[in-house]
Structures are given as C-alpha cells and as structure tokens.
Image: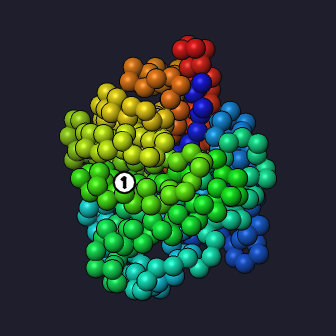
Amino acid sequence: MFDATLAGSLPKPFWLAETNKLWPQWKVEGRDLELAKRDATLLWLKAQEDAGLDIVSDGEQSRQHFVHGFLEFVDGIDRENKVEMGIRNNRYAAMVPQVRDKLSMKGRAHATEAKLARAHTTRKLKFTLPGPMTIVDTVADRYYGNREKMAMAFAELLNQEARALEADGVDVIQFDEPAFNAFTEEASTWGIECLHRATEGLTCTTCVHICYGYGIKQNIDWKKTLGGEWRQYESFFPALARSKISQVSLECTHSRVPPDLMRLLEGKDVLVGVIDVASDTVETPEEVADTIGLALKFVPKERLQPCTNCGLAPMDREIALKKLQALGAGTRLARQRYA
Ligand code: ZN
C-alpha cells in the first residue's frame, strides 16, 4: 500500500552542474562529464532507497533540462539559433530552439542512464520523458505549421525511445505535461491523443505528470493570478480517466487545487503531491500523512501513491534530500494510520 515515488528530477551536485538552476551549465566536459553524471545518478538512487521510496528514478542527472535534454537527441532542430518565445500559453518568455526540418531521432536518448539505474537498483524504476504538448510549447515551429501535427511527430519519436526504455527494464514511463494546465481544452483532445501515440505498444506502467510548474518565480507569480481555486484539472481529468494512461501525477499539498477533483480520475493510480517543491520548508512526516489522509477521501488506498508536487531540480540539494526523507517517513506513518 502507498508506493512512494517522486515526480522525477532531483538537484544536480555542485561538481556536476550549476546549482539552484532549472537549466544549468555542466561543470565538466567530455569523459569527466560522463563519469560525473554516472556518479550523481548512483548517489541519488542510494538516497531514494535510503529514504524508503518504492519507485525510484535517475533524478534526471544526465540531462540539463526536462525538455531540452530530450531535444538534444532529435534531428531537424536548430539548437544554435534560439529565439525568444512566450511559453506555457505566454506565461513567460524563454529562449527556445527552432524546428526547421522533419523530425527524427539521432539515436537513443537515455540508454546509458536507464541501463545504469536498472543495474543498480532492485526497486521499481521510473523514467521520465517530456510530453508532446509540452515539447511543442517549448520550441519554435518553422516547419510543421500546426501545433497538433508537430506534437504528433514528437509523439512518434517519444514512442521509439519509450519502447527502448521498456526493453532496458524500466517499470514506469512518465510523460511530463505541465502544458496541459495552460491549454486545458486542447489537453482533452489532441494532448491525450498524442500521449496515446507516445505510449503505443508499451506494456509497462504509463504515467502522465501534470503540475503547476517548478518552484521558480515565473510560476509562483502565475499561481497568484489563478484565484482561490485552481480548477484547471477539472477540464481534462474526465478525458484522462477514459484514456489508456494508467497513472496521473498531480499537485496537492499547499496548492489551491480542490482535492475533490481527484475523484474525476476513477480507475487510475493517482500520484498525490504530498511534498511542496516551491517551498524550502521541509514537511514533517505528520503533514505528509495528513495529506495522504485527505487524498484518501477521494482515491481508494490501493490506487494512491504519495509523490512530490513536481520535480526538485532547482532546489538546494540538502533540502531536497530532507524532503525525500520526509516523503518516505510520512508514507510509513500513513501505512500505520490507514492500514
Ligand atoms: Zn512538474
């Protein structure tokens, strides 16, 4: 009961990359970089196991950014000449690469870290990939002329990588779709269709993570404009409940998401955010167990997985570690309380 897991990313150690940044520069290069990525992956696997998490991840230690880390392996993109674009429905501006040609994979994107993680943990292994809708909201289109068409092209590439990750021994493949909360109507239609394309043929567990973003200033400011209740999930959860995706990861603690919206996900595993990634205050095990208790009003206990609200990448490393420990301890407490 209550398999504890995390949304995916974890902070990079100071010897691997710049700290406290969402899109940091690497600190070393060449073979040193490959070794540093490997060391950081093993370090976080151990930390997740020690914290008592049941489903662990590589912490995204081998990629600079959750979207651009995948795009590096895609041909047809001009990554040298970035342009400014409003992203997440114009919530903020970012410098983004440009799609200039038909998209194709250069080869495997994440084979090294997936195989490394698989070889070093016996726990269930989750691997994260950016969702098609979120990718098209993070690149400029100079070729396809249609967001949906470009998203489907990315979905095909994601499917190639996802099938290979499954063959590497990954148990859960999660697609990160924060853009669903920015384009709630399109999420129900082509957003989910693209996820179906990306997960086609997979037999492992599939998951979609939909959040209100990392704890960066642009997102914190945006949340202030969303009013007393954040009801974005309400538009597309019914469609997700009917979809073939098996799990949904959502924000809960310290958010203004009405918790009863979780009811709309009947039949799905629900990954409930019990750790706030936008605050450095470490949750107590009691708080974590209380949030699990709140979610239990709307999600059957065999379908509830305690999780983080989002990734922890831009956080201080020590705080992130303490938050993982709180997640593990709070889950154990909840098992005693609600068994
Ligand atoms: Zn997130």
Ligand 1 within 8 Å, label 1 CB: no
Up/down of 309 relative to 187, above or below = above
Q: Which residue is drawn at 43% across and 56% down?
A: 196
Q: Residue furthest front?
A: 201
Up/down of 146 relative to 265, above or below = below
Q: Mark 1 points at which residue?
A: 192
Quarter containing the C terminus? top right
Q: Position of residue 17 (x, y in %)?
A: 62, 65
Q: Where is residue 334 in the image (x, y as percent from the top left)?
A: 56, 20
Dot 1: what SS? helix
Q: Which residue is drawn at 74% across and 52% down?
A: 118
Tell me if residue 182 can be seen. Answer: no
Q: Residue at x 52, y 37 (%)?
A: 307
Q: Which quadrant of the figure has residue 98?
A: bottom left
Residue closer to the observer: 68 or 176: 176
Up/down of 12 relative to 138, above or below = above
Q: Position of residue 160 (x, y in %)?
A: 56, 67
Quarter containing the N terminus? top right
Q: Which residue lies furthest to the right in this view?
A: 119
Give neighbour class at mark 1: few <14, some 14-19, many 20+ (Cα, 10 Å). Answer: many
**What amino acid is labelled 1 in the image?**
Ile
Q: Which quadrant of the figure has residue 139?
A: bottom left
Numbered circles on residues, count = 1
User: Is residue 213 left or right of 281 when viewed as pictured?
Assistant: left
Q: Where is residue 81 in the image (x, y as percent from the top left)?
A: 42, 86
**Colour scheme:** rainbow
Q: Which quadrant of the figure has residue 264?
A: top left
Up/down of 25 relative to 77, above or below = above
